[in-house]
Amino acid sequence: MKRMFNPFHLLSLVCAAMLPVIAVAETYTVKVHSSARTYSPNRLHVQAGDQIEFRNVGTTIEELTLKGYPEILQVSLEPGGTHSFAIDESVKPGRYHFFSNTESAYKGILIVNPVMHN
């Protein structure tokens, strides 16, 4: 049996290709290793809508500062504690530094990328 060309199939493919790609928000966890004096990862690329969680995997209280987001964010994490927040759409793309407030301050960087629109 011979198949007939159906213009509606072609039209549906064209329409599907024209739909905008919807960015799905991601959730990222930054592990705070107070005994090793590190963050894992210590460099994170995110965009508006993404969720960030700082998790203290160490055995001591951790004082953490995220500078310039859009204000200074200061958090105290108990051992095993977490602090989460979402990257608000009003946050400008750029680099935001986070660091430990202890005497051996270790650092990380949060890079907010612009949201890509089609």
Image: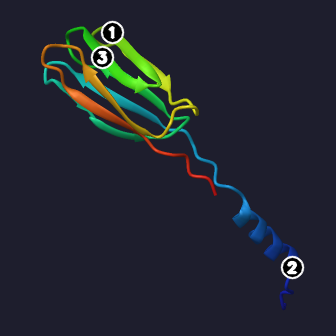
Q: Residue 24, how many percent across, how many down? A: 57, 43
Left or right: 17 with respect to 61?
right
**Which numbered disc flags the more N-terminal residue, 2 or 3?**
2
The disc label shown at residue 64, or none: 3
Query: How many other residues sit within 10 Å of disc 2, few (<14), some (14-19) or many (≥20)?
Result: few
**Which numbered disc flags the more N-terminal residue, 3 or 1?**
3
The correct choice, above or below, for 27 with respect to 71 in the image is below
Which picture quadrant has residue 80?
Answer: top left
Query: How many other residues sit within 10 Å of disc 1, few (<14), some (14-19) or many (≥20)?
Result: some
Question: Circle 2 sits in a helix, a strand or a loop, which is it?
Answer: helix
Which picture quadrant has residue 6?
Answer: bottom right
Closer to the eye: label 2 or 3? 3
The correct choice, above or below, for 7 with respect to 52 in the image is below
Q: Disc 1 marks which residue?
A: 76
Q: Label 2 sits on what residue type?
A: Pro
Left or right: 22 with respect to 54?
right
Q: Do the residues labelled 2 and 3 touch (CB within 8 Å)?
A: no
The coloring applied to the image is: rainbow
Q: Which residue is drawn at 64% across and 49% down?
A: 22
Q: Are marks 3 and 1 in contact (CB under 8 Å)?
A: yes
Q: Which residue is drawn at 23% across and 14% down?
A: 101
Question: Circle 3 sits in a helix, a strand or a loop, which is it?
Answer: strand
Q: Which residue is drawn at 41% across and 34% down?
A: 28
Q: Disc 2 marks which residue?
A: 7
